[in-house]
Amino acid sequence: MYSQTKIEILHHQVSELADLAQSQARRTAEDQELGALADVTQINHELNQIGILTRKVANQSGSLLSIGLPAIARDITLLAKLATTSCTKAIHAFLSQNAEEAHAAREDYVTLSHIHSRLSSRFDAALGQPGIPVAALLAGCVVISSLAQIGGHSDRIASAASPLLQSETVSSCSLQQ
């Protein structure tokens, strides 16, 4: 199971990356026109939402230990790892304007979405079983939903890297002509 300490470390790492991405985005916006400023504002929003969701995951993750269902625990761990890597890749892709890394982050999100769907079904089925701690299952639902949302925000950050790359390519071609 993803321990409380690992979640806290994840939150700290994501926060540091988010601060770096926000400062980079502001510098990029200063060098570009108003359209880029709107993109930067959207990226800042996505990063702020990721920060809120990581805190929510950290607050609820302690309750998960009492669920006691190994398949669910394994999938939650996988979901947390995918959310972490997707987020990290997306932020790095945005900072470096790396289309390949953005594509990899978006692929992680597709996998994350499938695992989230599978977990949601398992949680629904587990709610009907006698002796299952309902409070822990509800905390688990909050955790998996938050991790899926982190993946969604990461996907939007990753998708923002590609249009910026394309606009830079078009402007450099225009300057060469």
Image: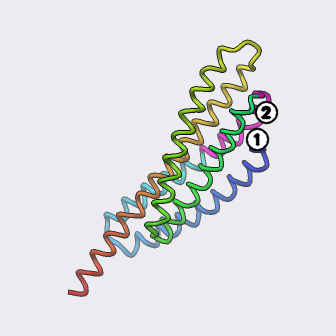
Q: Are marks 2 and 1 in contact (CB under 8 Å)?
A: yes
Q: Nearer the viewer, residue 44 or 124?
A: 124
Locate residue 89: give its quadrant: bottom right
- Identify the mark at residue 65; answer none if there is no mark: 2
The residue at the point 25 percent across, 87 percent down is 176
Q: Earlier in the sequence, mark 2 or mark 1?
A: 1
Q: x%, y% of residue 4?
A: 78, 44
Locate residue 139: give its quadrant: top right
Asked whether residue 65 is drawn in magenta, I would say yes
Task: Give the magenta part as a residue range.
Answer: 53-68
The residue at the point 26 percent across, 81 percent down is 173
Three-letter code, disc 2: Leu
| Left or right: residue 5 compared with residue 52 | right
Three-letter code, disc 1: Met
Q: Residue furthest front?
A: 71
Q: x%, y% of residue 52?
A: 60, 45
Q: Which quadrant, please, contains the C terminus?
A: bottom left
Task: Say above or below: 51 vs 98.
Answer: above
Residue that badge 1 annotates: 1
